[in-house]
Image (cartoon, rainbow, N blue to C red):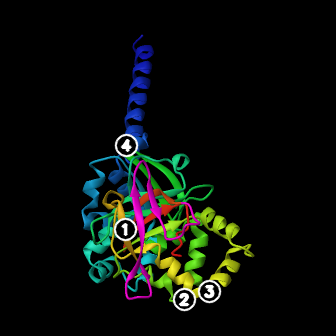
Amino acid sequence: MKTSLLKPLLLLLALSLFSACSDDDDSDTDPNPAATDLTGKLNADSRFSLFVDALKRTGLDASLDAGTYTVFAPTDAAFNAWISDMGYTDLDALEMGMGSEALQRVVAYHIIKGRYLSTSLQSGYSKSLGINNAKDTLRFYLEAGAQIKLNDQATVEDPNLVASNGVIHALNGVNMPLSVYGLLAVNPSYSSLEAAIGLADGNLNTVLADPSLSITLFAPNNTAFDSLVAQTPNVNILFELVADMGTDELATLIYYHASGQVLMRSELQTGSLNTLADNGSGGKLSVFINIGSSIRIIDNSSTTEDAVLTSADIVGTNGVLHLIDGVLLFQ
């Protein structure tokens, strides 16, 4: 009887010991990844050691603990490539060279508020946590689809690393803040304006990307340029429109869409607004802003409809981009 009772007891003890050992072996793994917060998940993934270091240096790790965010995290390979491209040997040298504030701006540019899995991301401009020198919130252009790209600079290579207070998408590159021109150039719906800027006299792509400038750019979409082409006699494509207009007049047209001050949507007022386009008499050409149920920009041509502001406050490093549905003509 003693033997028969002893065997089950020994078996039960062995099973208990095995279970305890198994729990100890699993202590370094996370059976429920969503139970780990963003900073914990980033710290636990060796691919993001440099990004984690940059978060700590800039104090942004504390921000991640205080809300719900989507983090586009460059891998160490991506971060090292960026450091090298910037002309530095390591993160210490990079921070010393560009400054902590500039580093914080870049790191914050990879974070947006809210939890967005890859399936819920949509093409368009996303508001980051980064700010420019004027303290306005920077945006980047996200291209959704089979491949998710940011500013046409970095691609998501491993999406949907879920945390308790958000989600992480691993990036194969560092997403750098763009100028007003840069934000325009990465959006395929504004490729006609980009092409016109490149064809105009005066290297306007360089001018509109100048970090020393503070500008507001009203950007007509491709459909607006198609309409202008269609209504211009003997013109069928954009290049014919440019040839008909001349590259010097085209430059004036581009400058007619820009103001030499940064005006957010809330700062636009009904009345005349001087543009960067010269009027030929030492002054500047102006457009008329009409604030109503919609914001309309009225040009100097009686043959065109008012341009309607369709999207606003797309902030770049040197100003703001407002999207409009018509090309503004100065004569």
Q: Are marks 2 and 4 in contact (CB under 8 Å)?
A: no
Q: Mark 3 packing: few (<14 Cα in 10 Å), some, or many (20+)? A: some
Which one is closest to the eye, mark 3 or mark 4? Answer: 3
Which one is closest to the eye, mark 2 or mark 4? Answer: 2
Q: Mark 2 packing: few (<14 Cα in 10 Å), some, or many (20+)? A: some
Residue at mark 3 to residue at mark 4: CA–CA distance: 57 Å
> What residue is drawn where x is 42% and y is 58%?
312
Earlier in the chain: of badge 2 and badge 4, it is 4
| Count of numbered circles in the view | 4
Q: Secondary structure at mark 4?
A: loop
Amino acid type for the residue under numbered disc 1: Ser
Q: Position of residue 21 (x, y in %)?
A: 39, 39
Q: Which residues make up the magenta segment?
A: 276-305
Q: Mark 4 packing: few (<14 Cα in 10 Å), some, or many (20+)? A: some
Amino acid type for the residue under numbered disc 3: Gly
Residue at mark 4 to residue at mark 1: CA–CA distance: 50 Å
Earlier in the chain: of badge 1 and badge 2, it is 2
The residue indicated by pointer 3 is: 246
Earlier in the chain: of badge 3 and badge 2, it is 2
Which one is closest to the eye, mark 1 or mark 2? Answer: 1
| Residue 272 disc label | 1
> What residue is drawn where x is 62% and y is 82%?
245
Identity of the residue furthest to the front in this view? 302
Earlier in the chain: of badge 3 and badge 4, it is 4
Q: Quadrant of residue 71?
A: bottom left
User: Does the magenta-highlighted stretch encompass residue 167?
Assistant: no
Identity of the residue furthest to the top in this view? 1
Q: Secondary structure at mark 3?
A: loop
The residue indicated by pointer 2 is: 201
